Every structure is written in C-alpha cells, then in structure tokens.
C-alpha cells in the first residue's frame, strides 16, 4: 500500500508563497534566490541551479547560470557537464518538444549506465552529487522574446535516495507558477515588450472600454483586423485577457 502524502500548514504556506509572493531580491538573471531557497525546503536537494535553455532554434541564448548554494568548481572538469555527454537526458525537452515533464536522470539511465557517463565520473561525482532532476521554464516564444527566451532548473542530490515521485509531482504542479515567476523577473529586468504605434493606439481604445466593433470603426479597419492585432499583442505580452494587456502596457499611467 502506498504511504499517504501529507502537507503541513508550514509547507502549505511556503507553497503559497512560491506561487503568490512578489520578491524584491531580483538577480541579474534567473529567479530570486529567496524563491530557490524556499524550493529547497520543499524538494530536498543539495544544489539548485538555473541556467539558460533556448527552446527557439533560431535564436541565440544569452548565457547565464545561478545556483544555491554556490559551488567550487576549481577541481572539476566543467566541460564534462556539456549536454553532448548526456544528450539523452539534457536534450530530451528540445528533442521531444515536451517542456512540461519533470524528468530524472534515472528515467533515462540505469544506475550502471549513469555511473559510466562522463558527466557523472568527471563532474558530479567529484562534486559529491549523484541524482539529478530537471524542469523547463520555456520562456517567451516568438520574435518579441526577452533577451533570454527560456531557462532550465536543475536539482542535484548527493548519493542516497533518488528524488521521489512526490518531488516530481510537486514540481509538476509548481511548474507553471515557476515559469510565470521567471517571465515576471525577465519583464522587471528588461521592461515590457515594445508594441507598434498602431498597437498602442488600439490598446488605449481598449483601456477606454471600447468594443472591437467600435475600435474598428474608429480606426477604419475590420473587426477581424482588430482581433488579429489583439492576438499578436497577447502573444507579445504573454497575457490572455484585455484587462491583463492594459495592465502590462499602462502599468503606471492612466490610459487616456
């Protein structure tokens, strides 16, 4: 019989904080370190790292890597961690297009296979790590993407028990919230994406409460064109409603 999974009130409050909190410790790249620390309280691990992972093949990723706690790599072959040495695992999201699944090294390698790989023998074992879990933060697709379009979270654990299905399920539930936290951090670092003059004009009419039909008459275009503009605006802003779009475009001013 499977043991029941319980969540304490303290854990629940931490999870709600991960989902809802607006954090002030914005780093130069990646996620707030306080958020990563809260995650480490929920998913027992010895290191959490966030790094660039561009899921748009026609774009050049802006490279970054943050981690908690900091690691001393002076006696390690860092190149041994390159994705080409364990592409079955690290390349799975790009190869499959599956950016939602939370994956473990043990999903792809037996213990014997894993212990014979270069990333393990020349990189992780000298660092005292064995188990790995990865989670995708897809970023923002399309030509209006932020300078860093996406990221990947990697959780590392020392020898002993592997990450559990509880860890996997918890991160699967948190994935859309972590992704949104990453997008929010990118927006705060780089500002809102630019809209065309016509799109900003359309957004001011939306902010004033006009319907698509009224906007079309005022701008001398069809309602279908208004809808097409809105779809592009929603994609650029990564929102799904008129109210959210107005809040993104006019955060600090009255839309008059």
Image (cartoon, helix red, strand yellow):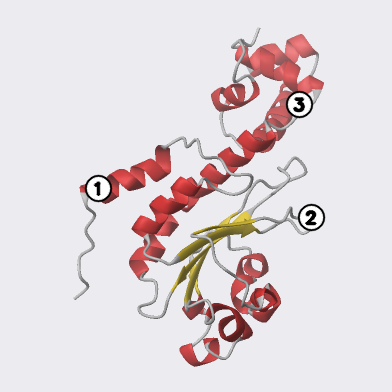
Camera-near label (2 vs 1) is 1
Separation of disc 1 and disc 3 at Cα?
50 Å
Q: How crowded is mark 3: few (under 14 residues within 10 Å), some or many (20 or more)?
A: few
Q: Quadrant of the C terminus?
A: top right
Above or below for 73 versus 175: below
Residue highlighted by disc 2: 60
Q: Which mark is residue 225?
A: 3
Relative depth, front residue between 224 and 85: 85
Disc number for residue 10: 1
Q: In this view, does 39 lie above or below 207?
A: below
Where, by quadrant of the figure, is residue 3 drawn?
A: bottom left
Give me the disc on residue 27.
none
Horizontal arrangement in the rendering, residue 247 relative to residue 161 (left or right)? right
Quarter of the image with the N terminus in it: bottom left
Q: Which of 129 and 14 is in front in this view?
A: 129
Dot 1 or dot 3: first in sequence order is: 1
Q: Could you tell me which secondary element the residue under label 3 belongs to?
A: helix
Q: Position of residue 78 (x, y in %)?
A: 66, 74
């Amino acid at each position: 019989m499977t043991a029941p999974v319980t969540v304490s009130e303290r854990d629940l409050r931490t999870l709600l904080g991960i989902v809802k909190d607006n954090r002030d410790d914005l780093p130069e790249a990646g996620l707030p370190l306080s958020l990563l620390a809260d995650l480490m309280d929920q998913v027992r691990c010895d290191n959490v790292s966030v790094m660039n992972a561009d899921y748009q093949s026609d774009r050049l990723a802006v490279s970054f890597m943050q981690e908690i706690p900091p690691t001393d790599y002076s006696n390690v072959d860092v190149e041994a961690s390159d994705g080409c040495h364990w592409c079955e695992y690290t390349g799975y999201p790009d190869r499959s297009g599956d950016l939602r699944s939370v994956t473990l090294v043990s999903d792809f390698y037996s213990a014997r296979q894993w212990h014979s790989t270069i990333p393990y023998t020349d990189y992780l074992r000298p660092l005292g790590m064995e188990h790995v879990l990865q989670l995708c933060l897809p970023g923002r697709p399309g030509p209006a993407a932020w300078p860093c379009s996406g990221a990947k979270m990697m959780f590392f654990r020392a020898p002993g028990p592997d990450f559990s299905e509880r860890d996997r399920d918890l991160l699967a539930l948190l994935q859309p919230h972590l992704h949104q936290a990453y997008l929010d951090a990118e927006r705060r670092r780089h500002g809102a994406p630019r809209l065309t003059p016509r799109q900003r004009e359309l957004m001011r009419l939306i902010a004033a409460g006009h319907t698509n039909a009224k906007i079309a008459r005022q701008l001398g275009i069809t309602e279908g064109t208004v809808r097409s503009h809105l779809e592009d605006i929603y994609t650029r802003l990564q929102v799904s409603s008129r109210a959210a779009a107005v809040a993104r475009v006019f955060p600090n001013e009255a839309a008059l």
